[in-house]
Amino acid sequence: VKPLLEVKNLHTHFFTKSGIVRAVDGVNFDVKPGETLGIVGESGSGKSITAMSILGLVPSPPGKIVDGEILFKGENLIGKTEKQMRQIRGKEISMVFQDPMTSLNPVFSVEKQMIETIVTHEKVTKKQARERATELLNLVGIPDPHKRLKNYPHEFSGGMRQRVMIAMALSCNPSLLIADEPTTALDVTIQAQILELFKKMQKELDMAIIMITHDLGVVSEVCDRVMVMYAGKPAEFTETKKLFDNGKHPYTLGLMNSIPKISPNKEKLKPITGLPPDLSALPTGCSFAPRCKHAMESCLSIDPSLQKVDDNHLVRCLLYEETKKAVTT
Ligand code: SF4
Ligand code: MG
C-alpha cells in the first residue's frame, strides 16, 4: 500500500536567545491509509512539534523546519504557503487537541461553526451542511443532535465537548486526523468512551489517525504501530503488539512501568526518574544516558543510531548495536 503520509528526515528547530532548541531532530515515519499510528513520549519529546510541522503550524519565528520532507499523498507540504496549508487543514488533514475550548469559538453555536467549516471547504448548500453536521454529531454519540447543534460550546460537558470537536474535525472527510492528547483532560470513564469512539471511527471511516499521547495505555487501546520519541528523535518504532510483547529501549520499558494498572489493588506507578534533557544543550552520546539504568561507558560518547532488531522493529540503543558495544567497552 502506498503511504498516505511520509515524513523524511524531519528537523524542526527553535532559534531562541538561549540557543538552538532541537525539538525535532531527525524523524522518519510513514502513515498508511486507514491505519492508526501512535507517537508517544513525555512532554518535550518532540511529538507535538512533529504534528505541528505536518500541519504547517510551527510558530515561526522562532521555529523553523530546517531539513526534511513531509510528503502527503506524494506532495511535499514544506514550502506550501499559509493559504495552501489552510486549504489542506480542515479538508485533507484535520486535528483534535487536548482542550477543545482552544479550537471552538465560544461566541458561536456549534451549528454555525460546523456549517461554516463545511461550506468553506465543500460545494454544498447550508441545508446540506446542516444535515451533515447533524449526522456527524450522531456519529460521535451526541444524543439529540438536532437540538444540540443549537448549543454553544460552554453548554457541553468536557467529554461532550471533545465529541463535538471530533465531529468538527470530521466535517470534511479528512484522510488523516491528528489527535494530540485528545483524552488527557478527561476523567477515566470519559477517556475510555472517547477511545471507544476513536476505535469506532477507525472501523467505520476510511481515515488514518496519528494519535499523540504520553500514555502507552492509550496506544495499546487504539494504535496499530507506535513510535516512541525521546529528545526529538525516535527511540523505538514498531507494531503496537511487538512493543508490548518485546519492547527493547530502556525508555520504552520505563514508560511501560508507569502505565496505571487497572486492578482493584492499584499497583504503585513507577515513573521514570529524572527529567528529559535540555534540547538546546544535549549531552554527547545517548541523550537518555543520564536517566538510563543500563547506561555503559560507551553511551556517554556514542550517539546510537536507529537499528533494525527484527522485522518492522527499530531501536536506538547501544545495547542492541553489538559491534559498537564491543569496540568501546
Ligand atoms: Fe541506555 Fe546506553 Fe541504550 Fe542509551 S544507548 S538507552 S544510555 S543503554
Ligand atoms: Mg504536547
Image (spheres, rainbow, N blue to C red):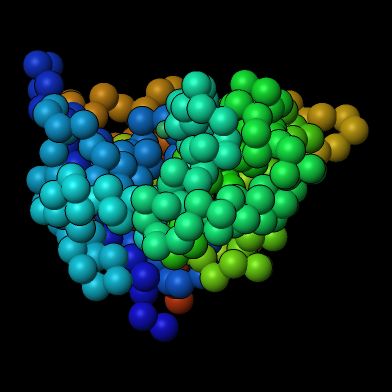
Q: Position of residue 265 (x, y in %)?
A: 88, 30
Q: Position of residue 227 (x, y in %)?
A: 43, 54
Q: Tell me the quarter of the picture where residue 92 sits.
A: bottom left
Residue at 51 percent across and 27 percent down: it is: 108
From where the camera sits, is residue 313 visible? yes
From where the camera sits, is residue 326 visible? no
Residue at 33 percent across and 65 percent down: it is: 5
Residue at 37 percent across and 70 percent down: it is: 4
Q: Position of residue 199 (x, y in %)?
A: 67, 58
Residue at the outermost top position: 17
| Image: 77 above or below 215 | below
Q: In the rendered image, which quarter contains the N terminus?
A: bottom left
| Image: 80 above or below 23 | below
Q: Tell me the quarter of the picture where residue 68 sits.
A: bottom left
| Image position of 277 (left or right of 151) | left
| Image position of 167 (left or right of 174) | right
| Image position of 194 (left or right of 211) | right
| Image: 329 above or below 245 | above
Of 146 and 176, the residue lying toward us: 146
Residue at the outermost right position: 264
Of 321 and 235, the residue lying toward us: 235
Looking at the image, in which quadrant does ligand 2 appear? top left
Of 162 and 67, the residue lying toward us: 162
Total numbered circles: 0
Residue at 30 percent across and 56 percent down: it is: 88
Q: Tell me the quarter of the picture where residue 224 sits.
A: bottom right
Q: Position of residue 240 (x, y in %)?
A: 57, 61
Of 193 and 242, the residue lying toward us: 193
